[in-house]
């Protein structure tokens, strides 16, 4: 990251102005679980060349860089001239294809091919690789020359060390606020009072390690830390806190306890714990508190140490960023990564040739911002690295009320935001509290602000924070200082689309205990126990899992019933409203039954779940939300069809009740417009819950616009004697009606209306069209038909754009009806945008032989496709498209 001549840094501790200890607190023992062993990833000698795979998956560049064009960084040659072995970062000349695992395999193969051609004894300390074409190792002069001539690399860079000197103590600023009024200056206190605390979001801190059991970093007796990793490489006299003193692999799972800080006798070792507290510490009620107290934490240690201090190599920092990217599916709420680090090399402009940029950009491509300190050298026209990278969010420090740039903060054109950095009180090792100063302290305040605000993309979040900030004159540069409450309060239409905002599916509620597999994205609403018959559970939704604290009128949920004791049904409705005469999921004893639910939020941002009979576990995943005053009108559920002739079984207006079962091959016409609070005009589609009750034979129902021909599609498949429900978004015919077709036998049908889409909304409803058919049946265009089942752990990607009424361009999400038809195993399906990673949530659960439908709202990938992941068994599927949302 820096030039060799500038090794003496101002980093991490970043000019700790004062360490004031107060309130020594007892540290409860960690309850994170059992350590996982990390596989060794370093090769420490080249006495034997690695074997080259017989069949390499690496595709070399068609035009390898000429030897004379291989750039060798001057610092590398300086080390070699001094007779030392040079730590280097090589950029490999490879063309990469495929998914993450395939890319990692290709790069590892390319690395091994290169090493096989180097002189024996010329290389050592080889580190693990990731999904980007870089490899770090140490080379002697012969190794560097052989690498230059190999035709397999594009550049040879210096793997610099970021040194952390012993923290300096300075006299406090005459206007230095403590964190008590620094959070007031930022507007965090009123933001907390309004409910903006970062719930559902996750922050990663790449630093000197974190004391995860610190009381300031606990929530309800459990650590806020949801994952740990360590990439602190030990070498020579430098020691590492990593398990077995070995850096983890970039593809390893998290390892509990791996990110613990180095010994407290070394001043810099408390730095990471202090930084983490500024981002997520406390509770947002008592002062001090971190900026995003309800957010979760990922702690990563990249600093090795000696008795003289700490340091981190560029390659270890890059591998930490790579690990976050590779494991991103484990952390669906990850919004921002904090790097309060920097060297002492002054960068007047951007340093985008730095390899770290590729790792920052990789995270940015999946919606994760990297927030970096500008440095503490007091420069007025430049910053340290990696804050000089153009795609990092670079942060300087202010002090006082109103904000003034500090004497130590590096100012420059690369700085994006300012935040309070002087005398900030936060957690330090040993369960204590203390005050520190520096851009290291300002940076996690911005990282926390990203977690609290968390707009659709990092660019939108940064733009909002800049647009609402207090502009500071910092060495002649006008740089906004964060005003969090203004950012969350302003009515800017950048929170998403005007109709539907999809989110990466995450779990918001799971009644099962953690030991039984229960888990949620923010550790809230988990392990509450089965919901009893006649019981109601209220679930907070707003401010969690990507749903904003304010502005959401309704949410799209996937609700799954797990192992009920008897048959019954669930009703999901707005909290605070009366229990409606409606149902969302019908179940029998022992079943696992999912259903999509679009439900209006109560005034407090919550929903209510009612269970009719027995005891049942319930899991709830959020997949998207609809803004207030959008093109979607959420309703309190209302029954508009009840074919059973049973006393008390009524509809909202007496129409279509007690009319008898629908016969085989018959179609029921259902007026929708003007009923159940649906407007009489201006309606393009309705959101319904359709239930087949006591089917006389195996059959299926198709819901389609009134006055049109029945399509080759189904919304609900049912076995003889079965009662099953499914969510349906149905286009309304010109006469304001829908039609329901029954294929076989006699079946009673119940229909509840949940909401409606206006004719001007961004959702275009379609007559259902089949896009995928595993069996020997037809699709709308002959594509993706008779393709066979999806294998266990397999993924099917299929084209949606340009098919079944979905335009070739301009669609960002689609409404699908997905049906599993007799899998050989018990498992689940997850729908996700092609090119992304399947989340841990599910859209549809099934057992062997079962026919299970469910409605899915899925984002399209850049290639216009949707992917389906099958967890287990050989699973045939049928997929129908019923609508799409415009970009």
Image (cartoon, rainbow, N blue to C red):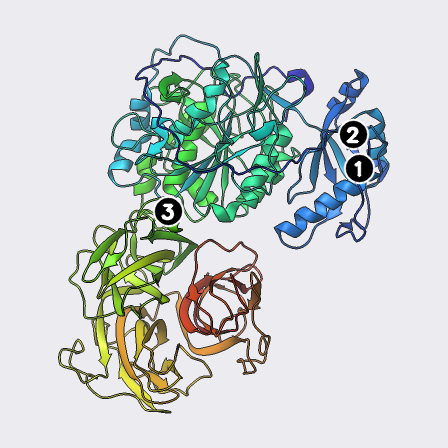
- List x then y, in percent, for residue 713: 45, 80
Q: Nearer the viewer, mark 1 or mark 3?
A: 3
**Residue drawn 57% across and 45% down?**
326
Observer-nearest residue: 862 or 350? 862
Q: Are marks 1 and 2 in contact (CB under 8 Å)?
A: yes
> Seen in the image, is 526 located left or right of residue 313?
left
Task: Return the residue at label 3.
Answer: 514
CB under 8 Å between discs 1 and 3: no
Sequence-wise, which precedes: disc 1 or disc 3? 1
Farthest top residue in view? 171
Sooner in the amino-acid sequence: mark 1 or mark 2? 1
Label 1: which residue?
115
Q: Residue 123 got which mark?
A: 2
Q: Position of residue 794 (x, y in %)?
A: 57, 62
Element carrying mark 2: strand
Estimate how packed mark 1 is, as few (under 14), some (14 to 19) or many (20 or more) residues with alpha carbons within 10 Å: many
């Amino acid at each position: 990251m820096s030039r060799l001549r500038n090794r003496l840094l101002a980093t991490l501790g970043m000019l700790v102005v004062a360490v004031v200890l107060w309130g020594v607190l007892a540290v409860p023992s960690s309850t994170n679980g059992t350590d996982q062993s990390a596989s060794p990833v370093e090769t420490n000698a080249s006495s034997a060349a690695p074997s080259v795979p017989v069949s390499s998956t690496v595709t070399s560049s068609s035009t390898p860089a000429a030897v004379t064009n291989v750039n060798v960084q001057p610092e590398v040659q300086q080390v070699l001239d001094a007779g030392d072995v040079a730590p280097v970062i090589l950029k490999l000349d490879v063309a990469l294809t495929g998914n993450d695992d395939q890319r990692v395999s290709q790069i590892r193969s390319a690395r091994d091919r290169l090493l096989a051609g180097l002189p024996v004894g010329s290389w050592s300390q080889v580190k693990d690789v990731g999904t980007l074409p870089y490899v770090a190792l140490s080379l002697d002069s012969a190794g560097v020359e052989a690498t230059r001539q190999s035709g397999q690399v594009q550049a040879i860079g210096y793997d610099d060390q970021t040194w952390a000197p012993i923290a300096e103590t300075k006299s406090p600023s005459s206007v230095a606020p403590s964190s008590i009024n620094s959070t007031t200056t930022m507007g965090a206190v009123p933001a907390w009072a309004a409910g903006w605390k970062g719930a559902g979001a996750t922050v990663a801190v790449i630093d000197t390690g974190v004391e995860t059991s610190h009381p300031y970093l606990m929530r309800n007796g459990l650590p806020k830390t949801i994952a740990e990793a360590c990439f602190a490489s030990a070498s020579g006299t430098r020691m590492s806190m990593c398990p077995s003193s070995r850096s983890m692999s970039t593809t390893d799972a998290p390892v509990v306890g791996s990110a613990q800080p180095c010994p407290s006798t070394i001043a810099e070792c408390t730095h990471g714990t202090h930084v983490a507290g500024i981002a997520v510490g406390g509770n947002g009620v008592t002062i001090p508190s971190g900026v995003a107290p309800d957010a979760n934490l990922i702690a990563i240690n990249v600093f090795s140490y000696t008795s003289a201090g700490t340091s981190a190599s560029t390659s270890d920092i890059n591998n930490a960023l790579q690990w976050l990217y590779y494991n991103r599916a484990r952390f669906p709420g990850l919004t921002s990564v904090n790097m309060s680090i920097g060297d002492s090399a002054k960068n007047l402009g951007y340093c985008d040739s730095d390899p770290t940029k590729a790792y920052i950009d990789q995270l940015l491509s999946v919606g994760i911002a990297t927030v970096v300190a500008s440095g503490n050298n007091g420069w007025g026209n430049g910053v340290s690295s990696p804050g000089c990278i153009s795609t990092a969010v670079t942060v300087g420090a202010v002090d006082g009320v109103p904000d003034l740039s500090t004497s130590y903060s590096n100012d420059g054109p690369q700085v994006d935001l300012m935040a309070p950095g002087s005398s900030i009180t936060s957690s330090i090792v040993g369960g204590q509290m203390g005050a520190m100063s520096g851009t290291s302290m300002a940076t996690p305040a911005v990282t926390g602000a990203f977690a609290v605000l968390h707009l659709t993309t990092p660019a939108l979040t940064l733009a909002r924070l800049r647009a609402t900030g207090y502009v500071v004159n910092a060495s002649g540069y006008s740089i906004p200082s964060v005003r969090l409450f203004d950012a969350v309060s302003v009515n800017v239409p950048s929170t998403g689309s005007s109709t539907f905002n999809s989110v990466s599916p995450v779990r918001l509620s799971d009644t099962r205990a953690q030991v039984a597999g229960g888990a949620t994205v923010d550790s809230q609403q988990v392990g509450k126990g089965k919901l009893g018959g006649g019981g109601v559970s209220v679930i907070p939704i707003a401010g969690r899992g990507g749903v904003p604290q304010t502005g959401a009128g309704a949410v799209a949920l996937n609700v799954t019933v797990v192992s009920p004791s008897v048959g019954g049904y669930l009703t999901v409705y707005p909290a605070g409203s009366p229990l409606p005469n409606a149902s969302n999921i019908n179940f029998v004893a022992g079943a696992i039954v999912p259903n999509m639910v679009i439900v209006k939020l109560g005034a407090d941002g919550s929903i209510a779940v009612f269970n009719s009979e027995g005891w049942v576990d319930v899991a709830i995943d959020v997949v998207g939300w609809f803004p207030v005053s959008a093109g979607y009108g959420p309703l309190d559920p209302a029954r508009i069809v009840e074919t059973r002739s049973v006393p008390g079984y009524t509809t909202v207006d007496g129409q279509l009740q007690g009319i008898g079962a629908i016969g085989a091959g018959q179609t029921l016409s259902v007026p929708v417009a003007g009923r159940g609070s649906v407007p009489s005009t201006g309606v393009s589609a309705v959101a319904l819950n359709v239930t087949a009750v006591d089917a006389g034979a195996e059959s299926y129902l198709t819901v389609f616009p009134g006055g049109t021909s029945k399509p080759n599609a189904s919304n609900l498949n049912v076995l003889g004697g079965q009662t099953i429900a499914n969510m349906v978004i149905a286009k309304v015919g010109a006469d304001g009606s829908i039609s329901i077709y029954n294929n076989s036998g006699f079946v009673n049908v119940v229909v509840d209306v949940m909401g409606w889409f206006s004719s001007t909304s961004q959702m275009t409803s379609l007559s259902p069209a089949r896009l995928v058919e595993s069996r020997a049946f037809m699709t709308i265009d002959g594509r993706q038909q008779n393709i066979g089942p999806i294998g266990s752990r397999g993924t099917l990607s299929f084209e949606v754009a340009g098919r079944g009424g979905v335009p070739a361009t301009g669609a960002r999400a689609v409404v699908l009806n997905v049906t599993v038809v007799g899998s050989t195993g018990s498992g689940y399906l997850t729908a996700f945008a092609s090119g992304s990673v399947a989340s841990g949530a599910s859209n549809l659960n099934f057992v062997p032989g079962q026919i299970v439908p469910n409605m899915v709202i899925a984002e399209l990938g850049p290639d216009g496709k949707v992917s389906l992941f099958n967890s287990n068994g050989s699973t045939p599927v049928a997929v129908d498209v019923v609508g799409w949302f415009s970009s």
